[in-house]
Image (cartoon, rainbow, N blue to C red):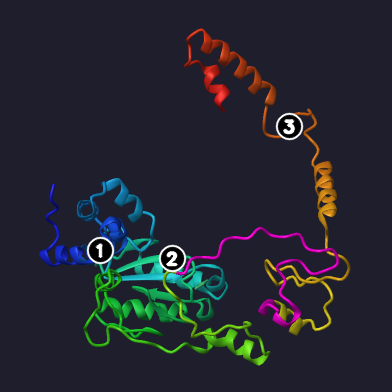
């Protein structure tokens, strides 16, 4: 069946998207295709799902599974302006929930709901990757940094009045459909549609601290080209650390990890393992733990986790399983393979 909802221009763009991928990898075009159909209808409708399925030779269940997995694909008609308020940890402690609650009350909608005039859809978001500017909200994925309830209300009021408030960073605001066409991989040629902002001070704070404390990644060259065709190095089995030395994943003292350097900056006299060096074993006083220590620790762990008072292994009723298995086997021999015991034995 041919889906007729979409314009010839959309169909031509769909062909262009599919042509970006190798012929035997056309299903990789699904994500931009979903943005494409969203750019025409404002959401991924059942017709949009059918269209993508038709173009890529997939079934609708396969397309629907992808469309319903990613939050950027909307499954219901969505307003021109998708207002996302971050209520995750960092923004929340800075007032993000208050911003969201105020907007919900002001607009008279809840999460993933659209105002009666069809202009604004509100949603709460889980970390918009701008924690350094919290609390943040986005309008069609452009940021408004450090918002408070008043400024947030001002933004949505201006949007509903037909204005396009200026975001904190990035280009002029696009409607959701205009944004979707960009996400499908088509440049927006209109003036001011694309802008390049400079990184702000909050984003540069980590860099400044590193410079201040002389922290750098050994041998790191930001201009190192990434060669195509490079294969990841084969995994090498970890070797046991020689007794009395550092653990195997610890670089030599003159090639310390940035985390270790940072920790030393904070605690120049620290002699023990540094807690904020995740995944990094650091030199400690005395010999490193050997295999025998590991066995001892394991034995201690086993001893500390005694079986339940009824002496049964935790979680499994081995005796009952064994009994069911025997019954299933005897029942199977007599030709009745669909008994409850048979099912029980499979558990
Ligand atoms: S917690 Fe709000 S942007 Fe990360």
Tell me the CA gap for discs 1 and 2. Answer: 20 Å
Q: Nearer the viewer, residue 25 or 321?
A: 25
Residue beneath disc 2: 124
Tag in front: 1 or 2: 1
Is the residue under label 2 in contact with that under label 1 (CB below 8 Å)?
no
Tell me the CA gap for discs 3 and 2. Answer: 45 Å
Magenta range: 230-259
Q: Which mark is residue 227?
A: none
Identify the mark nearer the N-term, 3 or 1.
1
Residue beneath disc 1: 38
Q: Residue at x 22, y 82 (%)?
A: 189
In the displayed orientation, state which residue is furthest to the top: 334
Tag in front: 3 or 2: 3
Q: Position of residue 301 (x, y in %)?
A: 81, 46
For residue 41, what is the image quadrant? bottom left
Identify the mark nearer the N-term, 3 or 2.
2
Residue beneath disc 3: 313
Identify the mark nearer the N-term, 1 or 2.
1
Q: Residue at x 35, y 54 (%)?
A: 66
């Amino acid at each position: 069946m041919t889906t007729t909802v979409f314009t010839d221009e959309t169909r031509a763009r769909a062909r262009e998207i599919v042509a970006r991928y190798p012929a035997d990898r056309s299903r990789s075009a699904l994500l931009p295709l979903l943005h494409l159909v969203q750019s025409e209808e404002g959401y991924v409708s059942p017709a949009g799902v059918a269209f993508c399925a038709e173009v890529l030779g997939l079934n609708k269940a396969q397309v629907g599974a992808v469309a319903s997995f990613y939050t950027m694909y909307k499954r219901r008609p969505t307003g021109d302006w998708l207002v996302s308020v971050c209520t995750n940890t960092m923004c929340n402690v800075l007032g993000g929930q208050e911003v969201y609650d105020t907007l919900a009350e002001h607009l008279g909608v809840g999460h993933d709901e659209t105002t009666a005039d069809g202009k604004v859809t509100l949603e709460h978001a889980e970390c918009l990757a701008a924690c350094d500017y919290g609390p943040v909200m986005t309008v069609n994925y452009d940021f408004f940094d450090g918002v408070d309830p008043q400024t947030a209300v001002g933004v949505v009021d201006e949007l509903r009045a037909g204005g396009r408030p200026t975001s904190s960073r990035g280009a002029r605001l696009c409607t959701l459909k205009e944004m979707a066409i960009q996400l499908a991989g088509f440049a927006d040629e209109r003036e001011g549609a694309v802008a390049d902002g400079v990184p702000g001070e909050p984003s540069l704070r980590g860099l400044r601290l590193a410079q201040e404390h002389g922290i750098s990644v050994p041998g790191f060259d930001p201009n190192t080209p990434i060669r195509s065709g490079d294969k990841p190095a084969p995994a090498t089995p970890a070797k046991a650390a020689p007794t009395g030395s550092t653990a195997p994943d610890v670089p030599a003292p003159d090639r310390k990890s940035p985390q270790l350097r940072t920790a030393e900056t904070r605690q120049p006299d620290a002699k023990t393992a540094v807690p904020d060096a995740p995944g990094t074993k650091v030199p400690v006083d005395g010999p490193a733990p050997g295999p025998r220590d590991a066995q001892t620790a394991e034995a201690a762990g086993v001893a500390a986790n005694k079986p339940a008072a009824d002496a049964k292994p935790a979680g499994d009723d081995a005796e009952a399983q064994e009994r069911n298995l025997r019954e299933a086997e005897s029942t199977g021999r007599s030709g009745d393979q669909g008994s409850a015991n048979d099912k029980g034995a499979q558990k």
